[in-house]
Amino acid sequence: SLFLSSAWAQTGYQPTAENLTARKTFQDDKFGLFIHWGVYSLLSSGEWVMNDRQIPVHDYEKLPAFFNPTAFDAKAWVSMAKNAGMKYITITSKHHDGFAMYDSKVSDYDIVDRTPYKKDVLKALADECRAQGIKLFFYHSHLDWHSPDYYPRGRTGQNLGRPDSGDFNKYLTYMDTQLTELLTNYGPIGGIWFDGWWDQQAGDKADPRKTKLDWHLDRTYSLIHKLQPATLIGNNHHVAPFPGEDFQMFEKDLPGQNKTGFSAESEVSQLPLETCETMNGAWGFNINDRKYKSTKDLIQYLVKAAGHNANFLLNVGPMPDGRIQPEFVKTLGEMGQWMQQNGETIYGTRGGPVAAHDWGVSTAKGNKVYVHILNWPDKQLSIPALSGKIKSARLFADKRPVKISQSAEGIVLTMPAAPADDAIDTIVELDM
Ligand code: JFZ
């Protein structure tokens, strides 16, 4: 009957008051650290290496015996994130390779049972995050290249040595049980960052949200919200958000862009937004990828994200011994110095009211509008008229006055000086 259809169940999602509060805090936080870390890190070829090199399960299973991150220091990781000005950490609890980076009781394919290290790194991280006042999110892969029950295999295809059979419903129960562990044993969890839904995408152009198998998202999402109502659910599916989701993510894209070239990038929803990017070109550790983005480019991306009303989740792929590459640590430290000075114009703001232009973006908080000029040729900048009248304007950095001429057609801001060649972001503070 109509009442029992899953569509009915899904449209019934009403976020709780604590969930709505968590959404607001999430939007205020603006900047987070993404961490891709697993036994794949040993091979220094990114987190897709099992699939890329077609490593059968029984061979890939030899990796955990070599995973011994004796230099892992939760305190150092969390301090690094805090010094960068980040307010939350999103770490891989299980990536597509199916290996749990925590002590799972429903599988022995995990860091405690299979590695010489034997310790639950997510537990150490959760404790340290709580001690330092940082929120912890778990990335969790729907897609699984290890479980025999992840069957029929999806878009990534291969059996990788597994039998041509499997019980998908059993896999879903297994996944829900692992999520229950993650939401029960690690204290308050900021969010679950799902990925791999797309592996079962049907490829229907008319309906990109159609999957070959039923993921039972509504069941998994209600379970999570029941266990921890404030936990925010996001899903890297690149289609319009499903009911039960609390934020919308844009992998490697500013909201509304589609430079990654997914078949159909979705519309920007009313949910809190997040974009993620890498520091080089890799998510999981890859020593050969030395295309490090500059501090300036990453700060400008963070500012652009804020101007597009989105958080920025910036990724590092730690080394197999548990350390984070010095190149990454250095850049994050420099971003943190910038945030110390300019965070007031980012944290707690919302994007707009001036739409993004080639010259930059704007953010707003209370009676302030911050015009972030990322790229401008001379002393003057024209912006569209605002709904209110500007009372006064100054450079955020040194409070030198900025001349304003306002008319119904628009506003001209005249800076006290032309931009320096190495300027990252010239911020004009407007009192409204
Ligand atoms: C996914 C992961 O596959 C990747 O390893 C990493 O974790 C990143 C953050 O998220 O990237 C995707 C997402 C979607 C597709 C491919 C890669 N897709 O739709 O083909």
Image (spheres, rainbow, N blue to C red):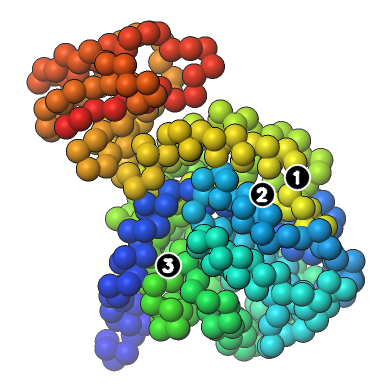
In this rendering, the label closer to the viewer, 3 or 1: 1
The tag earlier along the polypeptide, 3 or 1, is 3
> Residue 217 — which label?
none
Quadrant assignment, res 307: top left
The tag earlier along the polypeptide, 1 or 2, is 2
Determine if the C-beta at disc 2 is less than 8 A from ligand 1. Answer: no
Which residue is denoted by mark 3 in the rendering?
A: 232
Residue at (64% x, 33% y) in the render: 293
The relative height of residue 183 versus residue 206 in the rendered view (above or below) is: below
Which residue is denoted by mark 2 in the rendering?
A: 316
Residue 93 in view of the camera:
no
CB within 8 Å, label 1 to label 2: yes
Which residue is denoted by mark 1 in the rendering?
A: 325
In this rendering, the label closer to the viewer, 1 or 2: 1
**Helix, strand or loop at disc 2?**
strand
Q: Amino acid at mark 3?
A: Leu
